[in-house]
Amino acid sequence: MKLQTEPAVPTNCNADCSTAYEALRARYERVRARTSSLAEPLSAEDCCVQSMPDASPVKWHIAHTSWFFETFILEQHDPDFRPFNAEFRILFNSYYNGIGEKHPRAQRGMLTRPSLAEVQAYRRHIDERMIELLTRPQVLPAISALVEIGLQHEQQHQELMLTDVKHLLSNNPLLPAYAPETFKTDTQSLAFDWFEFASGVVEIGYCGNGFCFDNEMPRHRQFVERFAIASRLITNGEFLAFIEAGGYTDPAYWLSQGWDWVRDHHITRPLYWQRAEAGHSSIWQEFTLYGLQPLDLARSAMHLSYFEADAYARWAGARLPTEAEWEHAAAEMSEHVAVERLHPQASDQPGLSQLFGTSWQWTSSSYAPYPGYEPEEGLLGEYNGKFMVNQYVLRGSSCVTPAGHTRQTYRNFFPADARWQFTGIRLAKSIRN
């Protein structure tokens, strides 16, 4: 990860820098409070369970984000550092081999000890130490960039907490809601249009003075052929037409590995869809963070794997965009960034809509380093680079993505069969001259 800006606190800081100190402390407290608030609707039992190997218990997210600050900042820069619990160094390490041993990811749900109360005490202890460290003018210039990285990392885990909780609650026979209130249905979907772009050399990648991750750099040139991209995302109603047309039973639309995945796992519909009997007929329903709801045909289809997105695109006579096409189109036709919600809403904005704040959008681009890519030096270099294999890039952001993570250059990535994240479909097509 890299921070492409001046340090939050200048290296020659003096008494006049108190405003910068206060802003950094306030941001730290705000982000950390947000994580805690996301856990408030949950019971201790909710926070301990792991629903599948790809998801983590909320208790682990709470502990790991504190472990990050303890390991990368307090341990290195606090002269009075003492570990809260030396065993936590292993228990809450995620994938940093340079740190040392780590508890297996698939067994995080076995960690009934430490208790949630002890993890929360650990979090309070780290916050107290961090706030105290952030009052030391002589230390701030050295740690301000690291603090920003830690906060960006924590915001990523805030999104993961909600996606993991949704998967967990969906596996409970009671289908409990994370948020008990209801949401308004979208009565009418947006118009569907195609926007064309000429062939030529385009520039993609981050360029600016704000924060970005190292996988967004360097900015570089790519050639794109003439193409068109859809004005919005595919809706539930449109994806339902794919199902009713036999899309899940026709191998003609599927990549070979995708077809094996469909057959081996008996996939017949998106992750959170189900049929319910209603008199002499049946209706489609969708599990949401608001609980089980009637399927809203006007909303964007979500929780689709790359395999499903690619199959739908073939069925529709289109394809998925490359990440260069997506970013070029987004840069040329910007939109307002949607606010964070627990479930997406249709936008009434004309033009290229639903770029941000609805669902992550699969591209056909493999997750690989940009030309000239250089990972961050040291332990933080493990954050992105080593995952650049066997995954696809997603662009945009979802309804549960925190503010500040919705830039045009942000590169999310998942394997082709992942669908517990808020992932959807935007179509593209090549235009022949």
Image (cartoon, rainbow, N blue to C red):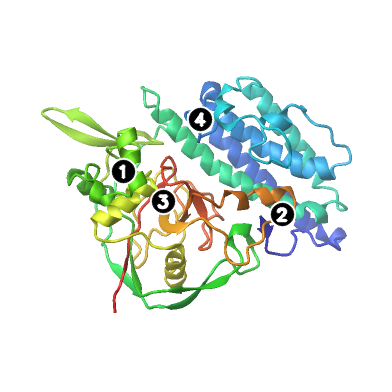
Q: Which residue sits at x=70%, y=36%?
A: 67
Residue 138 position within the rendered picture, expressed as x and y whole percent measured from the top left:
88, 53
The image shows residue 236, relative to residue 351, as above or below, that is above
Residue under label 4, please give it.
Answer: 41
In this view, the mark in front (3 or 2): 3
Q: Which numbered disc covers residue 370?
A: none
Tell me, yes or no, if residue 261 can be seen here. Answer: yes
In this view, the mark in front (1 or 2): 1
Q: Amino acid at mark 1?
A: Trp
Q: Which residue sits at x=38%, y=43%?
A: 303
**Is residue 100 toward the left or the right of residue 280 in the image?**
right
Residue under label 1, please give it.
Answer: 259
Q: Amino acid at mark 3?
A: Ser
Kind of element beneath mark 4: loop
Instruction: For label 4, count other residues whose C-alpha is less than 10 Å away and answer few (under 14), some (14-19) or many (20+).
Output: few
Q: Distance between the Cα atoms at labels 4 and 1? A: 39 Å
Kind of element beneath mark 1: helix
Residue 221 position within the rendered picture, expressed as x and y whole percent measured from the top left:
53, 74
Residue under label 3, please give it.
Answer: 359
The image quadrant where one finds the C terminus is bottom left
Instruction: For label 1, count other residues whose C-alpha is less than 10 Å away and answer few (under 14), some (14-19) or many (20+).
Output: many
Q: Distance between the Cα atoms at labels 3 and 4? A: 23 Å
Closer to the chain start, of discs 4 and 2, is: 2
Q: Amino acid at mark 2?
A: Ala
**Is residue 228 toward the left or the right of residue 330 in the image?**
left
Residue under label 2, please give it.
Answer: 23
Closer to the chain start, of discs 4 and 1, is: 4
The image quadrant where one finds the N terminus is bottom right
Closer to the chain start, of discs 1 and 3, is: 1
Q: Distance between the Cα atoms at labels 1 and 3? A: 24 Å
Instruction: For label 2, count other residues whose C-alpha is less than 10 Å away and answer few (under 14), some (14-19) or many (20+).
Output: few
Closer to the chain start, of discs 1 and 2, is: 2
